[in-house]
Amino acid sequence: MSRVVRLCPDAGELARAAAAEFVRRAAVAVAAGGRFTVALSGGHTPLRLFAELAGAPPGAVAWEAVHVFWADERTVPPENPESNFGAASRALLQRVPIPEANVHRMRGEDPDPARAAADYELLLRRVLAVPAAAVPRLDLIVLGMGADGHTASLFPGSDALAERSRLVASPWVGKLTARRLTLTLPVLDAAACVIFLVTGADKAETLARVLEGPAGPEPLPAQLVRPCGELLWLVDAAAARLLPPAPASPV
Ligand code: 6PG
């Protein structure tokens, strides 16, 4: 794993940097293998990335070769304002020429979240042509981080953090009094690249702990994401205010 932390002046610059990474990685993946597989997260931070991608010049991304998945989903129907799919669809997917067949949402509306999780695992294996014993390797997973250190829908203390065989879990999240659907750590760690997007002063203390602190007996979920590929943290100045100053670059 190679970990890079890149400081962006503000959330707007961070979104532009994230979009540039998305565009570049998509071009490399499509050139190398004919498609780009990416999992998106929910929450507010990715919305500016989605807007940047939606506004990118035509042809910047070969959308016909992109397959979009989700890192997690709320257990709500797609038309619910809480839906991660719904948010990405409105901000990005309805505004770019991505084939509908390439958009692979988690079925948050299923009254049986465990079944929805199992179905999504089958979908991942089918679309990515991954046999039962293997873990799919997505080209890119875009993650956020909550102020409590959660990522995707892997929350502190969750049993899902110990999941090593299933690709998708449906953990109960006490603080939300709801179940969520989430990729498990084996999938996050199998990715060619994971990009965390973290903005805002409310994340500063947790970001410093995740990036600089010891894992300790109860590591935060965001500390447990160790992709075999690249790990890039895009953080804005407000979220990074408690990080040690970056070493001066050699003159
Ligand atoms: C979700 C996200 C979640 C998010 C963090 C940060 O479904 O809510 O996947 O993991 O990334 O909560 O959210 P913000 O970007 O809104 O701070």
Image (spheres, helix red, strand yellow):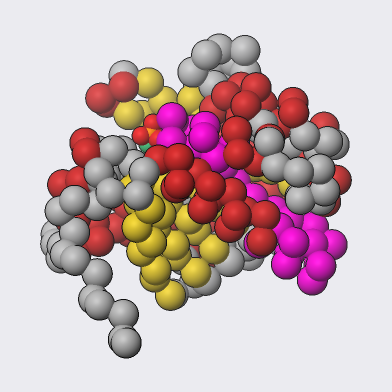
Picture coordinates of residue 127, whole percent (x, y) = 77, 49
**Location of residue 70 in the rendering, given as x and y in whole percent from the top left corner:** 59, 40
Residue 129 appearing in the image: no
Quadrant containing ligand 1 reads top left
Residue 143 lies left or right of residue 149; in this view the side is: right
Choose between 192 and 137: the one closer to the eye. 192
Which image quarter holds the C terminus? bottom left
| Residue at screen point 50% across, 44% down | 15
Q: Quadrant of residue 210?
A: bottom left
Residue at 51%, 53% (x, y): give it: 17
Is 232 part of what is drawn in magenta? no
Q: Residue at horizontal 21%, vertical 36%?
A: 202
| Pick the front one: 32 or 173 | 32
Q: Is residue 134 above or below residue 18?
A: below
In the rendered image, the residue lying farthest to the top is 80
Residue sitting farthest toward the bottom: 251
User: What x and y, as percent, mark residue 194?
Assistant: 50, 58
Q: Quadrant of residue 51?
A: top right
Say if the magenta span includes residue 47: yes
Q: As rendered, which of 193 and 163 lies closer to the eye?
A: 193
Identify the residue at horizontal 57%, vertical 24% (top origin).
87
Q: How many marks?
A: 0
72 to 95, vertically: above or below: below
Magenta residues span: 25-50
Q: Is residue 207 left or right of residue 39?
A: left
Residue 64: percent from the left, percent from the top?
85, 45
Q: Quadrant of the N terminus?
A: bottom left
Whether residue 191 is visible: yes
